[in-house]
Amino acid sequence: MGKDTHAITYPRFLLRVIGQSFEGSWRFYLWMTVLTAIALVGANAWAHQLVEGMRVTGMSDHVSWGLYIANFTFGVGLAAGAVMMVIPAYLYDDHEMHDVVILGELLAIAAIVMCLLFIVADMGRPDRFWHILPGLGRFNWPISMLTWDVIVLNGYLFINLHISGYLIYTRYLGRKPDRKWYLPFVFLSIGWAVSIHTVTAFLYSGLGGRPFWNSALLAPRFIASAFITGPAFVILLLQLVARLTRLRVGDGPIRTLTSVLRVTVLLNLFMLGSELFTSLYTGGTHSTAVTYLFFGLHGKSALVPWIWSAVALNVASAALLHLPASRGSRAFLNAACVAAFAGVWIEKGMGLIIPGFVPSTLHELVEYVPSMAEWKITAGIWAVGFMVLTIAIKVALTVLTGEMAVEPRSGDTRTGEHAPPLMH
Amino acid sequence: MTQTTRRVALKVLGATLGASAFAHAMEPLRAWSKDLSLDQFLQRHYKELTSEELAEGIRRLERETREEYGREVTIRDIRPQEGVQFGYALSLSVCIGCRKCAEACHVENNHDRRTNNSYIRVLEMDQGSFDMEKGDATYEHAVPAKGKYYMPVQCQQCDNAPCVKVCPVQATWKEPDGIVAVDYNWCIGCRYCEAACPYHARRFNWTKPEVPAGEINPDQGYLSNRIRPQGVVEKCTFCLHRTREGRMPACLEACPTGARVFGNLLDPKSEIRWVLENKRIFVLKEELGTRPRFFYFFDV
Ligand code: SF4
Ligand code: SF4
């Protein structure tokens, strides 16, 4: 097939992809309808926020970032963690993992879309978004860490779109993917995954006036927690995919991911402990934010329930993962994944962003509680993220299992069980 | 066949419902876009505007203030003078914590009345201690209180300003005379600068400022006290619309005790130079390397 035919097959492929996105069982329709409803509630709340201003949020000049940036930070970790599954697949040549790598890439795409939406939700003037585009606006590169973040996040989005798009398209054509068109990008994406979360950590740790964030351990902690949320989510996702579709994934990937998790949950707890020790044993200004976070200060304690539930969830997941019973029982494993995911969500969100601002730089204790509007917009963005993920996986799987192909393979009655692997 | 047509019909119905629900959800945006003109949307950075474009923008802003706030105002773009480097000093021995400076700032800079905003926060501190953690910015008793001293904090116009460093779009920068300015028409409202400032000097417009027409200060600077749009960040500019013309900042004029000293650091005969040469001076959070232009001193 020459180049010119791609001009025909590719748009046709895209059309079929769009068609696929509206095709499905009643469960699919129900799920998408619920998500759409939540997304609409969020969109409406956002429209109100634009008109009335950000006063509809719980933020203030003292706590100038809140739930949106907290979720943004978490989302970057999720995106980074999702792709790091490429490491066992390629660096250690674990062939069983190859099948799930694509799921990780799709998850990364959905997570980055969410991150970008959270940034937009947090902007006071989203109508001026073009000011931040390199070339069009006035881009404060390389000085501002935020411009680095814009570059790495968008770059990451494109890398992952390219890899998954390329693999799905070649499979659709019934051809073997050419390694030189995706393998370099796969390796690039590993490095890039580390960079997105490192740059995001530098956003905070580069601020000398905020002792709570001004720690060299912040970036490593971010990476460790990315290695928790990514695998935890994919373990759950793999089981759902196995239950709801015809794609069969062996136990191998789940076993590999569980062993990754066993290490990272402990690593994360260890680093949390180290930070606590430095802050609390030394005392002084550096410890006030930590004291406020964990124990409350001068009668103010809005974050205390958050952080202790995060610690409880993290410890619970670590315990569950190390109990011998978890080896045999999926229920144990799933509970551990849910706990780990939720624990990191709180810890990297409310437990990391807000205490950076409380006490403020003049040591005032102004508390922050997210408003209803913020919760609605946040839920809406998560719903959009799930919609993107659902459609992406659905399209990928119909191609992967051979249900959707440029020409029905002659006499092809194979289901996903025997489908050849997507990557080589 | 009927099966498929019904499916298609249902999908079309679903899509229509979805689209109209979306339009409905976004309905409030209509009111928002009314306030947003294309010129405003396309306006370039302050430093990239030609003098005609700037004059045009100023006329537009004056018209908007008239329409939205019901007050005739004059907005001027006053440029820094050659050979002037501004500095500010404050005597902690003299300040009594009356907060007249903060009040004057509020009025001079057309701050939102509802939030009673001001660029200045006055900390009440225990005598014999320099622990800001024990300071209190929300005291409500007669001043000066026994055993206390007072430390007003406002933008320190840092020479190595973290706020300027972090801004992703260069909406905030250091002017040649040392004042850190914000282009209210370029700021995207990310509030990164607010997170970066170690002195709590930046304010965000969480909503459109409310100022009754009669209380608006009509003497306005493009980069200083003109009424700010919703969703952008602002800060103390050493009242550049006054000081660049040789007048004193509003906070200094309002101070009943003469605790405040302002002037040109390059002028050897200025009062600020005398203070810097004869008093024991210190700056806040020196260890952060921000190199403030705001100095504190004790009279002894
Ligand atoms: S005090 Fe804050 S706002 Fe003022 S120049 Fe320094 S960092 Fe910027
Ligand atoms: S809020 Fe405005 S001035 Fe501050 S960093 Fe963001 S764009 Fe720059």
Image (cartoon, grey):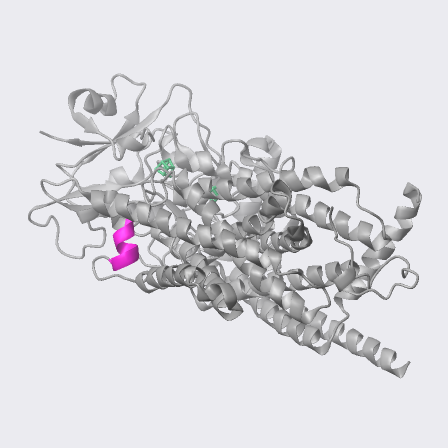
Looking at the picture, tell me which residue is in the foreground, B29 or B267.
Answer: B29
Looking at the picture, tell me which residue is in the foreground, B215 or A5.
Answer: A5
Residue A255 rendering spot, x and y as whole percentages: 56, 57
Residue at 88% in and 47% down: A6
Up the image or down, A88 lies above or below B165; here it is below
Up the image or down, B174 lies above or below A302; here it is above
Task: Indicate yes or no whether the magenta region holds residue A179.
Answer: no
Residue A280 rendering spot, x and y as whole percentages: 23, 48
Q: Quadrant of the C terminus of chain B?
A: top left
Relative placement, left or right, of A352 versus B76 is left
Q: So how many labels did they put on this image?
A: 0
Q: Quadrant of residue B245?
A: top left
Residue at 32% in and 42% down: A211
What is the magenta range? A289-296
Q: Quadrant of the N terminus of chain B?
A: bottom right
Looking at the picture, tell me which residue is in the foreground, A315 or B85.
Answer: A315
Relative placement, left or right, of B294 versus A110 is left
Whether residue B227 is visible here, answered yes or no, is no
Q: Quadrant of residue A41?
A: bottom right
Whether residue A177 is visible here, answered yes or no, is yes
Q: Main secondary structure of the magenta part?
A: helix
Up the image or down, A255 lies above or below A239; here it is above
Q: Quadrant of residue B169?
A: top right
Residue A9 rendering spot, x and y as whole percentages: 89, 52
